[in-house]
Each structure stands twice: as structure tokens, then as C-alpha cells.
Image (cartoon, grey):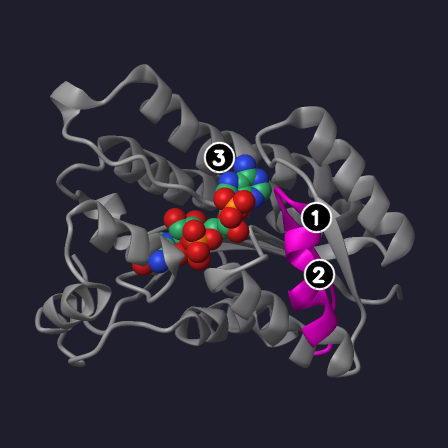
Amino acid sequence: MSRRTAIVTGAARGIGAAVAKRLAADGFAVAVLDLDEAACEPVVEDVRSGGADALAVGADVADEAAVEAAVTRVAQELGAPTVLVNNAGITRDNLLFKMTIGDWDAVTDVHLRGAFLMSRAVQRHMTEQRRGRIVNLSSTSALGNRGQTNYAAAKAGLQGFTKTLAIELGAFGITANAVAPGFVETDMTASAAERIGMPFEEFKASAASQIPLGRTGKPEDIAHAVSFFASEGAGFVSGQVLYVAGGPCD
Ligand code: NAP
């Protein structure tokens, strides 16, 4: 049996960094993949200081050649990946009448094309080993969110993608699930506050007032849910979407 290796995309910061650290604590060797390889180093150092193995990998998940090279490199340097967390993401919010084709394509490229390319490249290693866990980051925005036609479509699309992966890959012992966070405190929500000209603390307080648990999420809240889906014990849970939002979602 090969060493357990996980790849986390968009892991230089935010939710991805928390997921990488959590999976390392769970016993995985972790490939910390992001656009800028140097930006991954602090997470890699953190993981190594905790005694686990990690590798910084620079790649654009929407670039087919870069994805193929990155996955090959991870397999050679860390071991064949049997866990993939498709977390890389961006927002380009605008109301429909102001949304450009560039805004639309940039968001769907990273979330949908990126998750597709990464999953296609990694499943080869998973099917060979007849085991695997794919976890995709969706969002409560999949249920609809003003100013986010591109992002909502991509995050809803990821849910259909997840369920279909579960159906196609189940015979190989591979599960696919999605975690759909609500408001989480990261650079992504900080820049949303900046865009509307509201201090981040005020923005968080306003979001928390709408959340039954009375607080906004932390990256570690999401990492905990991802850790469950990535675990050996979750081997009979597949095709599910878990909302992690401090309260129920429709
Ligand atoms: P974040 O802090 O903005 O981090 C996203 C990371 O993804 C960044 O390091 C970014 O790199 C990287 N990335 C962007 N495009 C990439 C690409 N093409 N290839 C590789 N890496 C790329 O975001 P976050 O808040 O942690 O969000 C993580 C995931 O959770 C996203 O999928 C997001 O949609 C989802 N989510 C977040 C929230 C929330 O409230 N924060 C809620 C629901 C869902 P650069 O820094 O170089 O751009």
C-alpha cells in the first residue's frame, strides 16, 4: 500500500491552507498547490514543522498542461495522490447587466474547468490503487446570490460534477463529496467587504446577525468537514453536499 498523499488546490491561504494543515495532521503527505509556488512555502514549512511531509506546487488549475505536470510531479515526489481537494477559487462579482464575458469565463474556468482537469488527472492514480477521496468546495451561493451569476452557476455546477464523479468512480472505491461553506473569514470575504466599502469587522458582524449560530465561519470549520470526507471511515458516504454555514440551508 502506498503512502497516503493528498493534493489541495488554492492552498497558499484561506480555506485551502487550513485544509492542507488539517490533512497533514490527519497523517497525509500534502501537496500545497497554488498559482504561485513561492506563496505555498509558508504552509509547507508549517506542515513540515509539525513532522509531516509537504510539497509546494505552482500551477494554474485551469491550464491542462500545468495540471498534468503538477500531478505527475506530486506522484513522483510525494507518492500517488489518493485524496484531492478542489478548493482553488476566485470571485468576479457583478450584477448580470454589468458582468463581462471575462468575469464569467474567469470564474467558471477556475472552479469548473479547474476541478475537471484536476479530477481527471488524479483519478488515474486513484483508479490504479482502487481507493480515493475527492472533495470539491461548493458554496451556499450555489442556491443563488445577488451579484454572483458566474460564481453561483459554477458552485451549483460543482455539485452536479460531484454527484456524477460519485456515480462513475464508485466502482473503484473512490468517493466524491462537496462541502458548501457559508460566510468564512478569508481574503475572499475581506475583499468583498472592501468592494462595497465596508470595514471587514462590520461586514462580518452583519453576516453573523443572519447566521443561527451567531458567528461567521473560520477556515478550520471547513477543514474539519473536508477531513471527514477524506477519512478512511467515510468510505460509504458519496455524492453528498454538506452545507457548513452555521445553520440550515435550503
Ligand atoms: P482565498 O482566500 O481567496 O484563496 C483562494 C486561493 O485559490 C488563493 O490562494 C488563490 O491564489 C488560489 N487560486 C485562485 N485561482 C487559482 C488557479 N487558477 N489555480 C490555482 N490556485 C488558484 O479563498 P477562500 O475564501 O479560502 O476560498 C476557498 C474556496 O472556498 C473557494 O473555492 C471558494 O469559492 C470557496 N468558498 C469560500 C467561502 C468564503 O466565505 N470564504 C464561502 C464559500 C465557498 P492567488 O492568491 O494567487 O489568487
- Label 1 beta carbon within 8 A of ligand 1: no
145 up-or-down from 109: above or below:
below
Q: CA distance from mark 3 to mark 2?
A: 22 Å
- Establish if 88 lies above or below 222: above
Mark nearer the viewer, 1 or 3: 1
Residue at 73 percent across and 71 percent down: it is: 45
Q: Amino acid at mark 2?
A: Glu
In the image, the segment drawn in magenta is 27-46
Label 3 belongs to which residue? 110
**The furthest residue to the top:** 101
Quadrant in the picture for the C terminus: bottom left
- Say if residue 167 shows up in the picture: no
Q: Residues within 10 Å of mark 2 (few under 14, many from 20)?
A: some
Check residue 44 for magenta coloring.
yes
Label 2 lies in ligand 1 vicinity (Cβ under 8 Å): no
Q: Residue at x 76, y 41 (%)?
A: 70
Nearer to me, 13 or 138: 13
- Is 158 magenta? The answer is no
Residue 37's mark?
1
Please give the name of the residue rendered at 59% of the width and 57% of the height, measured from the top-left corner: 12
Mark 1–mark 3 CB contact (< 8 Å): no
Residue of label 2: 41
Cβ–Cβ below 8 Å for labels 1 and 2? yes
Q: Tag 3 or tag 1, which sits nearer the N-term? A: 1
Q: Earlier in the sequence, mark 3 or mark 2?
A: 2
Q: Nearer the viewer, mark 3 or mark 2?
A: 2
Give coordinates of residue 224: x percent, y percent.
Answer: 48, 75
Image-based side of 4 in relation to 134, left or right: right
Along the viewing direction, whichever of 195 and 217 lies nearer the viewer: 195
- Look at label 3 and name its amino acid: Val
x and y, in percent, of residue 229 in the image:
53, 67
